Image (cartoon, helix red, strand yellow):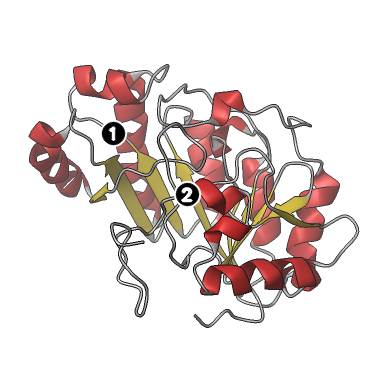
Amino acid sequence: MNTKSKPEFIQIETNIACNASCPFCPQKTMTRKPHRMSDEIWMKIIDDTRGHGITYRPFMINEPLSDKRMGKIMRYIRKDDTARIEINTNGELMTDQMADEILDAGIDTIRFSIDGFSEQTFAQSRVGVNYERTFERTLKFVKRSAKAGGAKRIEVRMIDMDINKHEQEAYKQFWSQAGAIPIVTYFYRWPWEPGVERVNLPCLKILREMFFYVNGKATLCCWDAHERAVIGDVMTTNVFDIWNGAVNQRYRSLLERGRRDQILLCSRCEAYKDHPFEGFPSPAQS
C-alpha cells in the first residue's frame, strides 16, 4: 500500500445529531461529547489544510443537514479554490433554505441515502424518517440543482439488503429518469457489532482519508463510533502532523501487514473481506 504524505479526503463531524434511528447504524449508541463541534475546531481543520486540493466531507456519524451552520461551513471551505465538498444525507431535512445555501456554496457531490423505493421497504431501513417528505425534497433538490447549475454530481444510494432486492431495478430506473445517479451499494457491518469477526487483511480506508470527531480528536477510521483508535487532537497539533505522526504511522504499518489483531478497533472488523489483496489468504483460510 502507498499512503500519501497528506490525506485526499477529510471528514469533519460537525455535530452528533441525526433525525433517523436506522437499525444498521450505531449513531444512537454514541455517548461522545460535546454534541456540537465549536467553530474554532472546524475552522482550524480547514485552515491547516488550505491550498492542498483536499475534498472535505463535513459529516461523519451524523446527519449533516441537522447542523444549521452547514451553509456557513461550506462557504468557509469554498474560500480555497482547490477544495471540493461532498456530503451524504438522508434527505428529509433538505428544506428550500438549506438547498439554496448548499447550492450557493458550490457543493461538488451530494449523496442521498434512500434505502427503499416503496414506503413499506423504506420504513424498515430509514426508521424515523418520513418517506413522502424525503422523496419530495430529494426530487426538488435534483430539479433545483439542474436549473441552477448546482451540484456537479448527485447520487441516490440504496444499501443492498434482502428487504429491497425486489425493487432495486424500479428504484434505479426512477432516479435515473429524475436526473440523479442511482447506486446500489454493499451492506457494511460496523466494527464490534455482534457477530462481526476480524479478517487478517490490510485496509484501504487508511490510505487517503482522515476523520475528525466533534471534539477535535482525529480517529483512524470513520467507522470508529466510540473512540477506539484516536490518532491525535487538532487543537494541539497540525492536521498534517497528525496524519504523518507516529501513532498513525504505526497503525498504517500494522494494517499494511494485515495485523488487525494489533489494533483494538480493527480487531473486530471485516471491512474489505472480499477485496483481493495480493499475498494474503482469504478470510476462510485465515
Where is residue 168? Give x, y as percent. 13, 39
Judge whether 217 appears above or below 167 on screen.
below
> Seen in the image, is 66 located left or right of residue 191?
right
Identify the disc placed on residue 115.
Answer: 1
* Mark-to-mark CA distance, 2 and 1: 23 Å
Instruction: Evaluate if marks 2 and 1 touch, with contact meaning CB atoms under 8 Å apart.
Output: no
Horizontal side, residue 120 vs residue 223: left or right: left
Identify the residue position indicated by label 2 in the image. 269
Q: Amino acid at mark 2?
A: Cys
Crowd band around label 2 with a 10 angstrom C-alpha radius: few (<14), some (14–19), many (20+) = many
Earlier along the polypeptide chain: callout 2 or callout 1?
1
Q: State the image coordinates of residue 163 (x, y, percent, origin top left).
A: 19, 28
x, y percent for residue 256: 53, 74
**Residue 239 appearing in the image:** yes
> Which residue appears at 32% of the width and 50% of the height?
155
- Quadrant housing the C terminus: bottom left
Identify which residue is drawn at 65% across, 44% down. 13
Q: Is residue 187 left or right of residue 129?
A: left
For label 2, the SS is loop
Which residue occupies the extreme front position in the image?
285
Q: Among all residues in the image, which is located at the extreme right?
A: 236
- SS category of the residue bearing label 1: loop
Q: Is residue 208 or residue 86 the one in the foreground?
A: 208
- Which residue is at a point 28% across and 33% down the rendered structure image? 115
